Amino acid sequence: MKRLPRVAVIITIVTIVLAGLVVAFVPLSQGLIERWSQRDLELRSGLVFRSIRDRVEQAMAGQPADLAPLFERFTSDERILALGLCDASGQMVVATGQMPKVITCGAIGDVGTAPARAVRFAVFNNSGNRVIVGGFPVGNGTPRGRLLIVHELRFVADRVLEARWYLIAGALALILLAGTLAALTVILLQRRLMNSVLATINDLREGQPRSLVKPIVPPPPVTTEIRSLLRDFREKIRLEDGSPVEWSPKTLHDLLDNELPDTEVFVVSNREPYIHNHAEGGIVVQRPASGLVSALEPVMRACGGTWIAHGSGTADRDTVDGSDHVQVPPGNPAYRLRRVWMTDDEQEGYYYGLANEGLWPLCHIAYVRPIFRESDWQQYVAINQRFADAVVREATRPDPVVMVQDYHFALVPRMIRQQLPKATILTFWHIPWPNAEAFGICPWKEEIIEGLLGSTVLGFHTRSHCNNFFDTVDRYMESRIDREQASVTLGGHETMVRPYPISIEWPPAAMEGQAPVAACRQAVIARYHLPADIRIGIGIERFDYTKGILDRLRAMDDLLTRYPEWLGKLVFIQVVAPTRSKLASYATLQDDAIRLTAEINERHGGEAYQPILLVIRHHEPDEVYELFRAADICVVSSLHDGMNLVAKEFVASRDDEGGVLVLSRFAGASSELGEALIINPYDIHGMSDAMHRALSMSEVERRERMHLMRAHVRERNVYRWAGQILLDASRLRKRQKVADFEAGNGL
Ligand code: F6P
């Protein structure tokens, strides 16, 4: 009823009232019809009288009985029942055979007196049938008489009955007509309403306000119903755009099916999701320690497609087919891994050189000087071209969706665009983008920006990284920047630049088969020969100088110095996966960390107690999750980090809502996980205070914080991250198709 247009309601009410009036009119109509009919008969009787008066008056002067045949002829009229003649003495001197017995000359009134000259009418009951008698004075002078003309009234009752049925049928027809009218009104209005609302929704989805769209048909007035529907649809959009949607592999899969049907999907990254290595017992598969891989792998499992990456394992060549493909995950294949090969020299220049000695320190402000070598740049260009060519070769359609990952492939988007102009290229920059000034020291800044602007969408973790990118483009390129629409147009090609905070799968695959928290704790205590009541701190990452590992160790030192109550009661397990060890900055970090750990352990520990356990080896995801679950606190002290998925993984691992996260404000994750204890890793005292607070926190507070963070990571999982990018891609794809159509290029 709420949604029924008002006009339909009015039509319905008016009809019901009208029909009611018609029905109420039925009894009234009976009296009216009777009166009209009697009047009609009186007139007819008058006519009959006037037509025979002369004959009657002549006969009265001579032989009244001669009138009998004339009277009988009149009764052949179906409504005239009888005729009779009364003389001056009140005797019926002539009467037709049908004259009812109840009708006598006296019954119609005196005939000899003056007033009796008046015409009289009376109704009689003739054996159940009503008749009307008209008494007309005859005999112009004396003797006077009266002509009786008797009409049947039965036809009046038939007429009343007939009229009643007509009225009822009319009322029903009226109701039916009005009902149909109301229904039609509702349907038409709803259809117009829906069209208008859907058009508005589309416009809102397209990010274009309704007012900017030229209406072909004037929009209907905005009624309350429209407004309420719009509210519903806006809510729907909000759901699509925001948290309450449950993002899962299925949601992502459905999104691809509905929004990007029959689309070929590619991921391009340097690091491969599964590395095959030769080991003593044969070939083993390793999952690399990489935030990029932990995020993208579940997405590919959900979407299918082809992942193109560097084959870096010692057994990688032995496990691919003739086209360098291998189906993964091993044992449960869901997508195809296409390996790209490179020589050691190429890897040296492209990966270690330009990517990790140049761009990595350039983008992470961690006070390690970036190194730029021309030869590295040449290798970088060549390897980027190789990966772009691999995409083009693998693509079987002109318009694949290609998800290019990270700073290793800044040139790939434009290289693909040149060969596949219709491709939808979604580039994600997993590390921070520095301010324009800092980026300006890169000798190939223009080429890198130009390469990235071959993308359809360019994503960063945070809005501030997007803003830094806009400033950089503004400073160094001739282009059109539309900050309102968040886009940059270079050489006629527009690239959307948006923040997409990356996340992890929920629930994490590594949680499958995890023992309860207490059992995990027991296992870790047993593995490292720790006392049963020990408090455990944990840090897990690649051995990278951006992670603030040395600062964390110093904070542990400071904690034990300033809060000696933790001596012997707290162990910090620092797990580090060796990475890029060939580079001096990384090798130095490892040496420094080993030395610093030894110093601190010596200062605060002894044979029985080592406050810091430095574990340098790669850990598979289930081992990492076991450690997280065993910990009282987890410290993420990045000096600068795009997002940092370790923080989110720790939260995801704590289904008991235990554990406290201590998190650097310079990690992108800090803008999402506000319930962590946020620290500045350059402030050692501040960090150790936070660690002390985390260890001393009440269970209630701990649970409350963890509960909120878990809800956030659950909602904003990696399926949502990929979903948001793919939704934007599908919108831009549709927009491009329309633009092509308008330009006459066909769809
Ligand atoms: O943080 C940037 C990044 O590419 C991550 O996405 C990934 O976790 C890490 O670097 C991988 O480093 P590498 O592949 O050099 O070991």
Image (cartoon, rainbow, N blue to C red):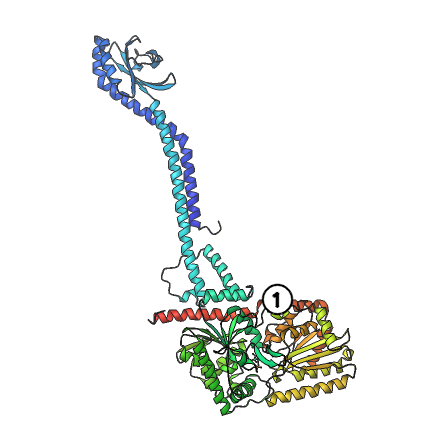
Q: Residue 69 location in percent, x, y?
A: 23, 13
Q: Is residue 91 above or below residue 676?
A: above
**Quadrant of the displayed image that contains ligand 1:** bottom right
Q: Residue 393 location in percent, x, y?
A: 43, 78
Front residue of this view, candidates 353 and 358: 353
256 sits to left or right of 528: left
Does the beta carbon at disc 1 come under 8 Å from ligand 1? no
Front residue of this view, candidates 76 and 459: 459
Q: Quadrant of the C terminus?
A: bottom left
Near mark 1 (Cα within 10 A), the count class, few <14, some 14-19 or many ≥20, is few
Q: Which element type, helix, strand or loop, lies under badge 1?
A: helix
636 sits to left or right of 258: right
Residue at which label 1 appears: 711
Q: What is the number of callouts on the image?
A: 1
Q: Is residue 267 above or below residue 163?
A: below
Q: Is residue 72 above or below residue 243?
A: above
Q: Amino acid at mark 1?
A: Ala
Q: Is residue 90 above or below residue 534?
A: above
Q: Residue at x 49, y 51 (%)?
A: 2
Q: Residue furthest front?
A: 281
Residue 654 visible? The answer is: yes
Specify the quadrant of the image occupied by residue 522.
Answer: bottom right
Front residue of this view, candidates 161 and 339: 339
Q: Residue 500 location in percent, x, y?
A: 53, 73
Q: Residue 8 location in percent, x, y?
A: 42, 48
Residue 721 visible? The answer is: no
